[in-house]
Amino acid sequence: MKFPPRKALGSNEIKSINQVIRYYKKKGIDPGYQGYFEHSLCKKFSLMMGGGYTDACSSGTAAAYIAISALNLKKGSEVLISPVTDSGPLNALILLGLKPRLIDSYPNSYNVSLKQFLNRVTKKTKAALIMHIGGETSQIYEICKEAKKRKIKVIEDCSQAPFARSIWNKKYSLCNKKFVGAFGDISFFSTMYSKTISSSGSSGLVFTKNKKLYRNVLSHADRGKQIWRKNINLKDPSKALHPALNLNSNEFSSAITLASLNRVKKTIKGRIKFLENLNNDLKSSKTCSVVYKNFKLFSPFFISIHIKTHLLKIGKINFVNNIKKEGVPLLNSYGCIISDWKWARKYMQDKFITKNAINFKNNSFNLFLNENYGKQESRAIVAKIIKVEKKFLK
Ligand SMILES: Cc1ncc(COP(=O)(O)O)c(C=O)c1O
């Protein structure tokens, strides 16, 4: 069976490229920085987030770098970081001269709960970089509440969970209405080609509800320039406030991202439906299951499938590779556990190892999905899993 490709570069994205060409041809100018399409994208995104300010930039890594820079943390400051992410956000902390201090995930997850945050927070902690991995959320409402008491800034990485809602809190109805990225002081989203909101290339978004922080975002995204000022010549470097790199987005990327954003709710809905089917179908498996609950609040990106490895007569990797050989689209071992990166160890504040995150990696695999998967795909995946399981059950 062939699993349907995503084809994120759909007809609306293609139309949007033509729109950019038409718009600038008509204007008789070349597409530049902070133009019409970037403005439209940022306005729409802010609106969908429930109000605030957005800046588009060149990548998710750039967005992380800008968001962290905007907080003006002193060099050497201690910053807590979730155990699982792409290397970009960690590299941003390191290159900004900050001291990353790892937090573990809660058992059977790549995300962080308040307990793990409290286990690792110290009097020296100045900020916390909290990720929402695989479409599930961290316990962000409670973490932000505790962080605020301690004057700790919270940066959310929503790259893998745009428009997911927090599932943890006691004030369930409040968080049900609020999307991740709107809890912390500032948040960032990678919109690189394979993300739920896709720019069909490299791109990112920074979001905040705080106008002052937003201005810091703008200047840190473009060479220290006061982008918000209408009465100065932005091409004149003497008017800049501080040194910063050029991490600007562009009009084509913004227009494509806007087209993707316009159908993101539908994208997420389709993925949730698939996840519900899969969860149901997997009930017939003795070894594999989806450990998450509350799928309706998710923004599925990949699905971690938990394996009862003790029931198998072969190792986990061997078992998963057999499922992969059957054609199931999956990643057998997630590489994004920071504790596993030897090169990063010397930059960390201490030698803490995130045992829960490593344990989850060792007992799960990441199933890829997209919004074109339906009942048929779910049944086919589970049939393959059960076929392999029957062969290798003790
Ligand atoms: C959770 C997370 N954060 C940050 C990034 C970095 O984004 P980019 O690849 O756009 O630089 C990614 C994706 O690669 C990611 O998955």
Image (cartoon, rainbow, N blue to C red):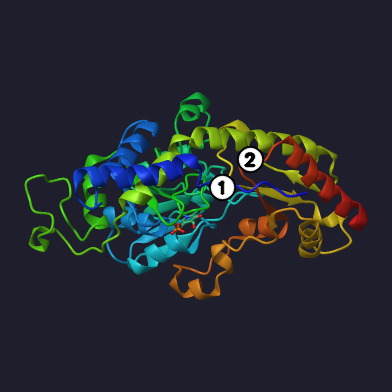
Please count the marks in the image.
2
Q: How far is mark 1 from mark 2, CA to CA?
A: 9 Å
Q: Position of residue 308 (x, y in %)?
A: 80, 52
The structure residue drawn at horizontal position 17% and vertical position 56%, both measured from the top left corner, is 225
Helix, strand or loop for disc 1: loop
Q: Is residue 345 above or below residue 356?
A: below
Residue type highlighted by circle 2? Asn
Q: Position of residue 364 (x, y in %)?
A: 71, 54
Mark 1: amino acid: Lys
Q: Residue at x 7, y 50 (%)?
A: 232
Q: Secondary structure at mark 2?
A: loop
Which residue is denoted by mark 2 in the rendering?
372
Location of residue 311 (image quadrant)? bottom right
Q: Is residue 124 visible?
A: no
Instruction: Find disc 1 in the rendering and name its residue.
Output: 7
* Nearer the observer, 67 or 37: 37
How far across and down, in percent of the image, does residue 169 sit?
A: 52, 33
